[in-house]
């Protein structure tokens, strides 16, 4: 409305300027030199025009639109679902059933008998058919094929759900400059995640695995951990961004929360926030350690807790540090740390229990600090999920890694990370909204 009023008054202002020029005996096209020497008499009109133009220009939005926050959290929930389904795909040994990468045409599920026979014939050319799913029937192949096909397609769907609205939000001016940078960064993570997924699958399709008698056709534990790490980074980024947008909008609509701002800036609260950030990194590291366990099937060893190997606290040293994993190179004994299933499981046990004790100590400390209500609720949720995670882990181990227990263990790990991130977010200082 202000812009329309300014435009409506332009003819009157120009007419007034012409009248002043005519009174001085000057024409408009011969007035440039005159105005250069008589600027004080013409300055008020020009300044008024500039003031009107400045008033008519809309001010940039100080925060992203609320819909961006809700959409970001919805995308985070999709990532959670994809991670859980990906774990099920791994647990059912279905991830190598599709031996080709077709980003567009691969979205279609085979329908005719001939198409299924063609896919089955392709699968038979790779080591997993001959060493893992020996003599599998076509009906059984269809089941594992669907698991991998669905995992890839919900990934494709997520790409559409993320990229299309992100472009629209940017084009329609619903995000700030900082918001555009964050959306671009998470879009890069999305693309990297898809590429890493296929790169991971190719490690299990290597024909050299069929030539080694001691080799089991499965994806590289390194690439599996990298694939999961990208998913966790994307989940964390989407969650923190969504919470941040909604928080900024609440601040922009309401009066300044001086009391809450002062509470979050207390030295003891700021120190506690830094400890929670470190704890969240510890949770993420423990989750990636679990990916290494899954990649090596290390959970199938030492199905007892807290002991390992009957009445022993630790297995024999030779089982933890063996020259076999050095591959004939005495300087490569370090490979035991990431390739020896016994040592990898021990590392995960130590990390998991250390994480639980750290989170328990932080919960005990946080109960005595002047934390806001949302932070206190997130603190209790984090502790409860940490205790549940230990119980699920032990249950998964001592029962020989049943699919239901293992899937719940992985899903709860994401929820535990989410609780730690939520607690960290609620403790962050309030942003200054212009």
Image (cartoon, rainbow, N blue to C red):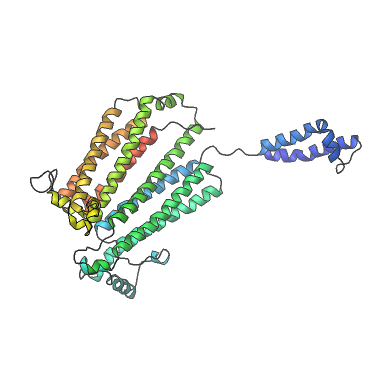
| Outermost bottom residue | 114
> Can residue 401 be seen?
no
Say which residue appears at 25% left-offset and 33% top-offset. 360
Q: In the image shown, does 249 or 123 lie closer to the viewer?
A: 123
Say which residue appears at 48% left-offset and 49% top-offset. 184
Say which residue appears at 72% left-offset and 36% top-offset. 50
Quadrant showing the N terminus:
top right
| Outermost front residue | 330
Quadrant showing the C terminus:
top right
In the image, is 324 to the left or to the right of 250? Answer: left
Residue 343 location (% of width, % of height): 19, 49
> Can residue 47 be seen?
yes
Residue 130 location (% of width, % of height): 22, 69
Residue 201 location (% of width, % of height): 32, 61
In the image, is 357 to the left or to the right of 102? Answer: left
Residue 57 lies in quadrant = top right
Say which residue appears at 32% left-offset and 25% top-offset. 369
Residue 414 location (% of width, % of height): 31, 45
| Outermost right residue | 25
Q: In the image shown, does 344 or 52 lie closer to the viewer?
A: 344
Q: In the image shown, does 168 or 281 lie closer to the viewer?
A: 281
């Amino acid at each position: 409305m202000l812009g329309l009023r300014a435009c409506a008054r332009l003819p009157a202002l120009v007419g007034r300027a012409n009248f002043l020029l005519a009174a001085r005996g000057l024409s408009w096209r011969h007035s440039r030199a005159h105005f250069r020497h008589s600027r004080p008499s013409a300055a008020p009109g020009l300044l008024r025009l500039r003031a009107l133009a400045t008033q008519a220009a809309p001010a940039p939005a100080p925060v992203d639109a609320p819909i961006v926050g809700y959409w970001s959290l919805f995308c985070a929930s999709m990532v959670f679902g994809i991670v859980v389904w990906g774990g099920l795909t791994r647990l059912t040994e279905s991830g190598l059933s599709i031996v080709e990468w077709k980003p567009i045409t691969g979205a279609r599920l085979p329908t005719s008998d001939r198409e299924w026979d063609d896919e089955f014939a392709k699968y038979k050319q790779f080591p997993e058919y001959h060493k893992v799913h020996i003599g599998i029937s076509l009906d059984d192949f269809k089941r594992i094929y669907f698991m991998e096909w669905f995992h890839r397609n919900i990934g494709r769907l997520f790409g559409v759900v993320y990229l299309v609205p992100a472009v629209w939000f940017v084009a329609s001016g619903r995000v700030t400059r900082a918001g555009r940078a964050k959306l671009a960064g998470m879009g890069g993570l999305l693309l990297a995640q898809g590429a890493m997924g296929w790169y991971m699958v190719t490690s299990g399709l290597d024909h050299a695995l069929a030539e080694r008698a001691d080799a089991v056709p499965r994806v590289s534990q390194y690439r599996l951990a990298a694939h999961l790490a990208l998913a966790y980074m994307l989940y964390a980024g989407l969650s923190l961004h969504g919470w941040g947008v909604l928080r900024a909008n609440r601040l922009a609509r309401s009066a300044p929360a001086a009391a809450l701002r002062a509470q979050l800036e207390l030295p003891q609260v700021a120190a506690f926030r830094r400890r929670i950030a470190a704890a969240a990194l510890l949770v993420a590291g423990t989750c990636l350690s679990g990916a290494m366990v899954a990649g090596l099937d290390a959970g199938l060893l030492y199905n007892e807790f807290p002991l390992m190997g009957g009445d022993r606290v630790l297995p024999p040293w030779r089982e933890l540090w063996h020259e076999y994993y050095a591959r004939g190179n005495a300087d490569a004994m370090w490979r035991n740390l990431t390739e020896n299933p016994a040592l990898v499981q021990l590392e995960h046990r130590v990390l998991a229990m250390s994480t639980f004790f750290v989170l328990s100590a932080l919960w005990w400390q946080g109960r005595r600090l002047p934390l806001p209500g949302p932070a206190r609720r997130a603190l209790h949720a984090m502790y409860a999920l940490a205790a549940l995670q230990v119980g699920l882990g032990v249950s998964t181990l001592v029962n020989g890694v049943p699919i239901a227990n293992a899937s719940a263990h992985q899903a709860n790990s994401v929820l535990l990370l989410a609780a730690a991130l939520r607690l960290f977010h609620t403790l962050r200082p309030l942003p200054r909204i212009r």
